[in-house]
Image: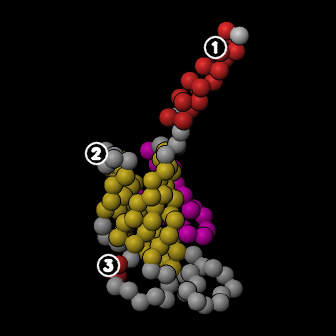
Amino acid sequence: MKALILALTMVIALSGIAHTAGKTEETVKVSLGKRATAERGRIKIQFLEVIEDSRCPRDATCIWAGNAKVRISVSRGTGAPRIVELNTLTEPRNQILYGYEFELKDLQPQQGETAQKSSTTVLISIRRK
């Protein structure tokens, strides 16, 4: 009986450790030309430019969904920023830097929608690796 209680206690304790050591995910919205922070300010992301946007406009019937490609700057702490390009459909959709995975989730507005350049935003998912 003591062995069973000890085994159950160990399982509960280890599951608590595994849960706290789990990977976290954060999504950051960044406007074109602006900066945002993640991971409590440790990661800085700047949305530099939209390189291409061939995505199918909303409410249109297209043969191919299309792709949006953006360039962002990522830095950690006081280190020099690294420039990466991410895509919505083609590779690379994500990059691993500083022990984090950065993935482009969305670019707004959708191709064909009228909007001011200042309202262009990206959604970047950040996961600790």
Of mark 3 and mark 1, the one earlier in the sequence is 1
Helix, strand or loop at label 1? It is helix
Taking the image as shown, residue 103 lies to the left or right of residue 80, namely right
Q: Which residue is mark 2?
A: 78
How packed mark 3 is, by other alpha carbons closer than 10 Å (few <14, some 14-19, many 20 or more), is few
Mark 2 Cα within 10 Å, few/some/many (few <14, many 20+)? few
Q: Position of residue 69 (x, y in %)?
A: 50, 71
- Per the model, the C-alpha gap separating discs 3 and 2 is 27 Å
Q: Which of the numbered marks, if any, corresponds to residue 6?
A: 1
Q: Considering depth in this image, is 128 or 53 the residue closer to the camera?
A: 128
- In this view of the protein, which residue sits in the foreground, 128 or 71? 128
Range covered by the magenta-colored residues? 83-98
For residue 118, the mark is 3
Which residue is depicted at the point 37% across and 66% down?
A: 30
- Crowd tier of the residue under label 1, counting other residues whose Cα lies within 10 Å: few below 14, some 14–19, many 20 or above: few
Q: Residue furthest top?
A: 2
- The answer to which of marks 3 and 2 sits earlier in the sequence is 2
Instruction: From this view, report whether residue 77 is shown above or below residue 55.
Output: above
The answer to whether 61 is drawn above or below residue 102 in the figure is below
Q: Quadrant of the N terminus?
A: top right
Q: Is residue 41 left or right of residue 19?
A: left
Q: Amino acid at mark 3?
A: Ser
Image coordinates of residue 35 in percent, x first then y, are 31, 62
Can I make out residue 41 in this image? yes
Q: Secondary structure at mark 3?
A: helix
Q: CA distance from mark 2 to mark 1?
A: 47 Å
Decide: marks 3, 1 in contact (CB < 8 A)? no
Asked if residue 89 lies in the magenta stretch, the reply is yes
